Every structure is written in C-alpha cells, then in structure tokens.
Image (spheres, rainbow, N blue to C red):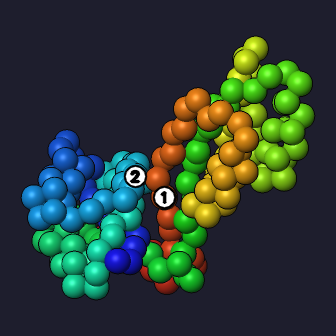
Amino acid sequence: MQKKVFQLLVDNNAGVLSRISGLFSRRGYSIESITAGITADPRFTRITIVAAGDDDILDQIEKQVAKLVDVKEIKELKPASSVYRELALIKVKVAVSERQGILAMADIFRANIVDVAPESLIIEMTGDQSKINAFINLLEGYEILELARTGIAGLARGTESVTYL
C-alpha cells in the first residue's frame, strides 16, 4: 500500500465535503486525512486528501472524485514538488520540575507552548508528518493526555500549477 496526496478545488457549496467522503466510504477507499478550507476566492474550497491503496485503487479514486459535479480540479501533490504541513496540539502531563526538559525539546523542534496549567502543558507544532511523529516519539517518557492533529494541508511549489477560475 502506498499513499497519495490529492488536492481538490471544489465549489464552496453545502454538503460538498459530505459527498466526497461519501464516495470514499461507498467504495471502501481509505482516507488517512482530510482537510478543507476556503480559498482566496470565497466561491471555492481547497480540500487536501491523503489516501492509501495500491496503484489501481489510487487511480480509481482520482477518476471517481474528478467526476463529482462540485469538483473543479483534482491533482496529485507529489512530495518532491509540493509543500506539506500539519498542525498538532499535544497536551502533556508534566510536573513543574520536569518542564525544563519539555521546553528544551519544544525549542529544538520549533514548537510553541500555548498553554501552561499546574499539571500540564499544551504544545503547538507545525511541520511535516515525520517531524511531528519524531517529536511525539521523544515524548515517550511523559504522559500525553490529549493529542489533536489537523491532517496534511499542502500546495504545489511554484506558479506552473496554479488554477485560475
């Protein structure tokens, strides 16, 4: 199984995300992550989907999604020619005496402490999935109370692939 990152440009209509995710569930396709947000033009939404499967399944996903009425464009964001980012919020149980270690690790990974409570910290970090996974693995000695990840958002590099509607 391999993964592909698809970027969709869709009409900003009610239910479009539901129709896209419904297509995946009806056909038994796997979604690893999905993010959506309005573009600079409020008529359109950009959706980034990470899907897993073999080559035939991934090709079929691309063809089936492209057929949906609200979908204006679908393209694969290849790792070498794209920028991917994810946001993670990590709540860690930590005593006052252990905070310095967490702060040092967060600094190395360019993460930010966004909340401090008597017994916990919330760490915000952005980066690619491997960076976030590496940071989470380093927190192994600490108790992670809660973890929220956004999933990948991405754009192709340069101006060649920009779509003007």
Q: Secondary structure at mark 1?
A: loop
In the drawing, does residue 45 fall left or right of residue 93?
left
Q: Is residue 66 visible?
A: no
* The C terminus, quarter of image: bottom left
Percent position of residue 19, x then y: 15, 52
Q: Nearer the viewer, residue 157 or 120?
A: 120
- Horizontal and vertical percent position of residue 32: 37, 59
Identify the amino acid type marked 2. Answer: Thr
Task: Work out whether residue 138 can be spotted.
Answer: yes
Residues packed near mark 1 inside 10 Å, few (<14), some (14 to 19) or many (20 plus): many
Res 112 quadrant in image: top right
According to the picture, the residue beneath numbered tag 2 turns out to be: 35
| Residue furthest out toward the top | 118
Q: From the image, tell me which residue sits under label 1.
A: 152
Identified at 57% across, 70% down, the residue is: 83
Q: Position of residue 157 (x, y in %)?
A: 57, 76
Q: Callout 2: 10 Å neighbours few (<14), some, many (20+)? A: some
Mark 1: amino acid = Ile
Q: Judge left or right: residue 117 versus residue 165.
A: right
**N-terminal-most mark, 1 or 2:** 2
Q: CA distance from mark 1 to mark 2?
A: 7 Å
Q: Tell which residue pokes out farthest to the left in this image.
A: 26
Quadrant of the rendering where the N terminus is positioned = bottom left
Q: Is residue 102 left or right of residue 162?
A: right
- Is 62 on the left or on the right of 97, as rendered? left
Q: Residue at the spot x=62%, y=35% of the render?
A: 144
- Give coordinates of residue 56: x percent, y percent: 22, 85
Q: Are marks 1 and 2 in contact (CB under 8 Å)?
A: yes
Q: Which residue is located at x 57 percent, y 83 percent?
A: 80
Mark 2 secondary-structure assignment:
strand
